Image: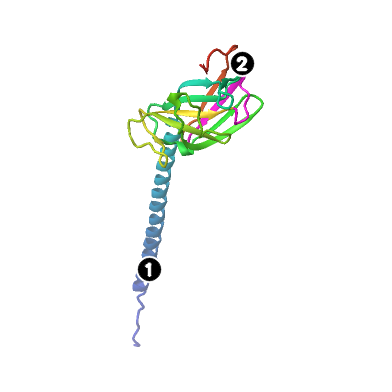
Amino acid sequence: MPATFSVDSRAESGMGALLVFIAMMLVSAVVAGVIIETSYMAQQRAHTVAENAIAEVSSGLKVLSVVGDRYNPVSATLDTKINYIIIDVTLHSGSEALDLRRLVIELTDGNVLATLVWGGIETANISAGETPVVADSLHFSVYPVRMLSGNFSATEPIISQGDIVRIYINASAAGLNLAPQTRIQIKLIPQPGIPTIIDRWTPDVYIGRYIV
C-alpha cells in the first residue's frame, strides 16, 4: 500500500494573521499619534485664542476728564474756538498694560476726520501755561501725570494699572473747527483692547481759557 502524506497549512494561516495584526497595530499607532498631536495643537490654539479674547475684552482706557484749551500761541490770545484737547486717561480695572505707541486716536467735528498716532512725550512746560509743542496735525503727545510703575519713558511708554497719563491733541492743526455748539467725537483705539468713545457737544458759550 503506497504511503500518503497530509499537508498541514495551519502555520501559514497563523503567520498571515500575525502579519495582518502587526500591520493593524502599526497603522493604529500612527493614527493615534496623529490624533494626539492634532488634539494638542487644537488645545494650544484654543488657549491662545481665549487669552487674546480676554485681553481684547478686558483691556482699554478709561477717560477721567476732557478739557478744551482756547489759547492761541501765535497771537497769545484766546480764540473763539478750541485749539487743543486735553484728555486724562487710566486703565480699566483688570486691563493689561498698554503700549501707547500702538494707540490710535480718531476724532471728528462732523466735517473733518483726523487720525492721530503716537508722537512722543510732551516737552512743553504746561504748568507754566505753555501749549503743547509735540502734538501736531498727525500726532498726539502724552505727559505722565501719575506713574506707579515708574517705568514710563519715551522708548517704552507703557501704562500700567494705577497710572494716569494726559493726552494732548492739537485740534486746530488736525483741521477741526471746534466752535461753540459743535459736536465732537473722539475714539481712543488701543492694541489690544476695546475702543473708548467720547461723544459730546461743546458749550454754547466759551468763558475762560479752559473749557470743560
x, y percentage for residue 132? 50, 30
Q: Nearer the viewer, residue 209 or 1?
A: 209
Instruction: Give the spatial CA distance, label 1 vs label 2.
Output: 90 Å
- Residue holding disc 1: 19
Residue drawn at x 48%, y 26% is: 130
Q: Nearer the viewer, residue 185 or 169?
A: 169
Q: Nearer the viewer, residue 142 or 4?
A: 142
Among numbered discs 1 and 2, the one appearing first in the sequence: 1
Residue drawn at x 38%, y 52% is: 36
Task: Give above or below for 138 relative to 74.
Answer: below
x, y percentage for residue 173? 60, 31
Task: Give the secondary structure at mark 1.
Answer: helix
The disc at residue 180 is 2
Task: Give the secondary structure at mark 2.
Answer: loop
Name which residue type carries label 1. Leu
Residue 191 in sight from this viewpoint: no
Region rendered in magenta: 172-191
User: Could you classify mark 1 by the number of other residues whose Cα lies within 10 Å: few (under 14), some (14-19), or many (20 or more)?
Assistant: few
x, y percentage for residue 102? 48, 38
- Of discs 1 and 2, which sits in the foreground? 2
